[in-house]
Image (tube, rainbow, N blue to C red):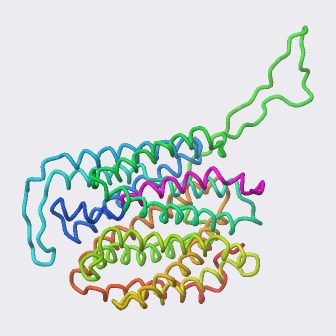
Amino acid sequence: MSAQTRGVFPILLVNFIGTLGYSVVLPFLVVLVLSFGGNELIYGILGATYSFFQLIGAPILGSWSDRIGRRRVLLVSQIGTCIAWILFIVALYLPGDALLQLNYGWTGPFLLTLPLLMLFAARALDGITGGNVSVANAYLADITTDENRKQDFGKMSASSNLGFIVGPVLAGLLGSTVLGNLLPIIAALVISLVAILVIYFGLKETRNKDVERCLSEDQNHKVLSQEHKECYQMKHEKDKSWSELLQIPSFPLMLVFYFLIFLGFNFFYVAFPVHALAKLEWDVFELGIFFSISGGLMVLFQGPVLSYLSKRVSDRVLFNVGGVILAIGFLAFLSENIVFLGVGLLLFAAGNGLMWPSYLAILSTIGDKKEQGGIQGLASSVGSSASIIGLLVGGVFYSLFGAMIFLLPAVIIGIVVIISLFQKGQTQTA
């Protein structure tokens, strides 16, 4: 392991562990929602609940990380996640009697139960403390160099996807035991506790309060044989408001891209699990294998492939090429043929693996390093807004149009590429 890799390894490990914890439960989440009385709309609303509360929490935590330090905020975020998994466990033991039965036609029939409400409470708590991704990106922006920026953000994305390789397979193995859905959630709780320990013992703080001397260097240090300590005055800069951050050149355009990319992804992510279980007739284990293969391919593209290309191709070109590949990949999911699904999976991984790390690398060059917490937090909030829309509308659209919903993310990502091609270099590239 090179010295540069050792420098970023702790934050990569934190990112991997965080993703691993969620991906262990991910294949079961739709099953839990359905078993507790919900339907595809409720599954989308549950995802939107996390995004809604992250919309509130992420910019606050991001700004805090600029002021009090990334490490402390990451600890707060992981503790919130840990408590959320405890609420998941509580939900499994609550009585499942229907509190309310609803069916308004376009919503489809569903039941409101105590376990379902507890899942919503858990996702809300995880969301309000869910600034870990934006703060982790800001942490990486603090420690990376211009030379290694693309590779490091590629490694960051790869560490997330590595969690998506291990997590769903682990979920399938744990879920097949006599403990059923309980054991994967316990595993997620334990993984979250490990993340807390890694942050506490493994991460060094990168954002320290600035100081300035009050005493000049040529001042006498000893008077009557007594050494006087140098005096310092703490400098505190007020956090920049959203309007001030939006004055940063090219940042508004990057927020538009963030919104559209997340909107497209969330149309896909809310629809595909339901599509796989209902239309393709997959079971939870097969869905887990799909996510694992997807994660493995993205690790390949975000790791060695991106590392090779980043030395030869600009961020902007990788961003646009990845977007085209991704849009074509979404179109492949319109078919139920296993060959087309496999091609779609490969193109999805390749496009995502090239496009998203390149976007993050570009975003990390915007503004000063001391503003990265606010920048990443605001961007995360915009992504959360898109997630809320995509998850809510995606659930309804799938119930109305089925697999045709996969046309939407293809068109949206295509629009992003077209805007990028015609905005004539306003976006900064490394």
* Span colored in magenta: 1-25
Q: Is residue 13 left or right of residue 175?
A: right
Image coordinates for residue 265, horizontal then vertical, percent: 42, 75
Residue at position x 32%, y 77% in the image:
271
Q: Nearer the viewer, residue 33 or 417?
A: 33
Q: Is residue 249 left or right of residue 388?
A: right
Residue at position x 28%, y 71% in the image:
392
Quadrant location, the N terminus: bottom right
Residue 227, above or below 199: above
Q: Is residue 351 left or right of residue 226?
A: left
Give the mark count. Answer: 0
Image coordinates for residue 263, horizontal then vertical, percent: 41, 75
Residue 367 visible in the shown view: yes
View extreme (top): residue: 224
Q: Is residue 15 magenta?
A: yes
Residue 331, above or below 41: below
Name the image quarter holding residue 140: bottom right
Image coordinates for residue 366, horizontal then vertical, percent: 64, 66
Q: Nearer the viewer, residue 380 or 348?
A: 348
Residue 253 visible in the shown view: no
